[in-house]
Amino acid sequence: MAKGIARIAVVVCSNRKPRANPQIANFVLETIESTFQDRWDLTPELKVIDLGEKNLPFFDEPGVPSQIHDYTKYAHEHTRAWSQEVQSYDAFIFVTPQYNWGYPAVLKNAIDYLYNEWKGKAAMIVSYGGHGGGRAGVQLRQVLCGVHMVPTKKPVELAFPNRKILLEAATGKDLGLDGFSDKGVWSGATRKQIAETFAEMMDILCSNKLKKGLKSAAVTFGFAKEEIRRKFKKSSVDHSNGTEESKRE
Ligand SMILES: Cc1cc2nc3c(=O)[nH]c(=O)nc-3n(C[C@H](O)[C@H](O)[C@H](O)COP(=O)(O)O)c2cc1C
């Protein structure tokens, strides 16, 4: 039987110019492609979303996104377009720098625009920085749980080997990253870590309970039937973030 496709976005989460993020996102994508083991019911199809190219204004919707179940009800065309784009993906790999111990404002802004479009979808966080950007990753994980995504337990943290390389990265200099071999700044151990975390995300994505929710969300957002809503609610109770839909903080 032909396998289904899982559409997965690799999100470039910074918008400075020049910047390191696009080449690191590309490294992550290449690493996944070159280490992928074909053992799931779904075949992943990876595409890059660059928040630096989206030019979303600071969040300006009059409504509260969690209360909006039909994308045509958003006030602004840029929100409707962003909603449709996010709806079209089953999972998200956020590749983010650490800025002052947090993650970039452009990413928080892009998340806050929507709610039901994120809900129930698998996620993986790849942070980078002088020490791997782990503090940004922890903050982002909490926010993803807030919109009821299902992030992997294991993060990926990419540490620049030294200050010189960190500063070169910040000017957009080509770091010679190579996702297809163990040469380059980040070695075999890092590529293995990316492959393992991606495998964890594929497990989340393919788990039966979630799969039902995902299909429902992707197909019916904006036209939600009561039955599908009920199923979706059930599947969102015992995800790894341990929260219930009704308990938003
Ligand atoms: C505003 C700002 C804050 C930063 N804060 C941190 C930090 O907290 N920890 C760290 O390791 N690197 C920090 N850096 C260095 C970044 O890791 C490095 O500049 C990287 O290239 C940023 O990603 P980008 O080029 O895609 O924006 C910071 C850089 C900027 C521009």
Image (cartoon, rainbow, N blue to C red):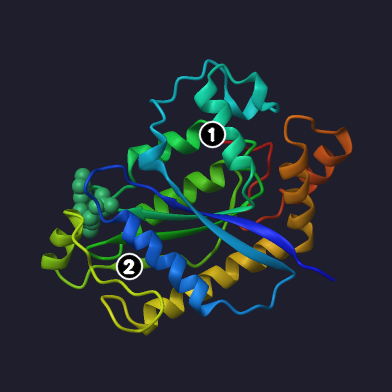
Q: Amino acid at mark 1?
A: Trp
Above or below for 11 versus 36? above
x, y (%) of residue 105? 34, 38
Question: Mark 2 sits on what residue?
Answer: 158
Task: Tell me which residue sits at (53%, 64%) in the image.
Answer: 153
Asked whether mark 2 lies closer than 8 Å to ligand 1, one says: no
Q: Position of residue 86 (x, y in %)?
A: 58, 41
Does the rendering let one see residue 149?
Answer: yes
Q: Residues within 10 Å of mark 2 (few under 14, many from 20)?
A: many
Q: Residue at x 49, y 77 (%)?
A: 34
User: Of callouts 2 and 1, which one flags the residue occurring earlier in the amino acid sequence?
Assistant: 1
Query: Can residue 114 be seen from the camera position used here?
Result: no
Q: Which residue is mark 1?
A: 82
Q: Is residue 100 shown left or right of residue 201?
A: left
Q: Choose between 210 and 86: the one closer to the eye.
A: 86
- Picture residue at 62% right of the left edge, 49% below the top: 89
Q: Dot 1 surroundings within 10 Å: few (below 14), some, or many (20 or more)?
A: some
What amino acid is labelled 2 in the image? Leu
Q: Quadrant of residue 23?
A: bottom left
